[in-house]
Image (tube, grey):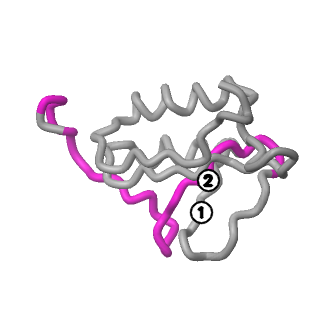
Amino acid sequence: LTPERAPTEMHLSDCAITAEGFGHIMSAFEETEVYPAPIMKGGRPMALYMRLENNYIDEAAIQEKVDAGVIAAYRKGSGSRVPSIGAKKVDLIVRENGRFMQKQGDPPAPEHA
């Protein structure tokens, strides 16, 4: 994957992702130099726009990545996204109240997800 071919959005809502799966996804972002990626040739670097609502991720796991500066909580409709500064690699969509919108309890079996 190169910055020129890196996706700019990732929609993973309603996929029954757990904290373990989230950890693997975030590790991939933390280990790559691709993000923040330029949005166009010569453009300023932008974090990946990501949606993860309605999964089974412990919100503390998400908050840990926010606190570490890997994720920025982004409210859809709150204005233009700004170029990434520092290590931020993901702009994660949150509700007006800043919640990560995760489901509680155990996820369904994979064949029912």
Which residue occupies the extreme right position in the image? 42
- Apparent side of residue 4 relative to residue 66 in the rendered image (left or right): right
Dot 1: few (<14), some (14–19), or many (≥20) neighbours within 10 Å? many
* 93 drawn magenta: yes
Image coords of residue 30 (percent x, y): 66, 29
Q: Is residue 111 above or below residue 12?
A: above
Image coords of residue 53 (percent x, y): 38, 54
Q: Is residue 31 above or below residue 16?
A: above
Instruction: Answer with the quarter of the image where residue 76 lies.
Output: bottom right
Q: Which residue is mark 2?
A: 91
Q: Which residue is mark 1?
A: 74
Q: Residue at horizontal 59%, vertical 40%?
A: 7
As measured in the structure, the alpha-carbon distance from the residue carrying label 1 to the one carrying label 2 is: 6 Å
- Labelled pair 1, 2 in contact (Cβ < 8 Å): yes
Question: What segment carries the magenta color?
Answer: 85-111
* 14 drawn magenta: no
Which amino acid does the dot numbered 2 rest on?
Answer: Asp
Instruction: Answer with the quarter of the image where residue 18 lies.
Output: top left
Image coords of residue 84 (percent x, y): 78, 52
Dot 2: few (<14), some (14–19), or many (≥20) neighbours within 10 Å? many
Which residue occupies the extreme front position in the image? 41
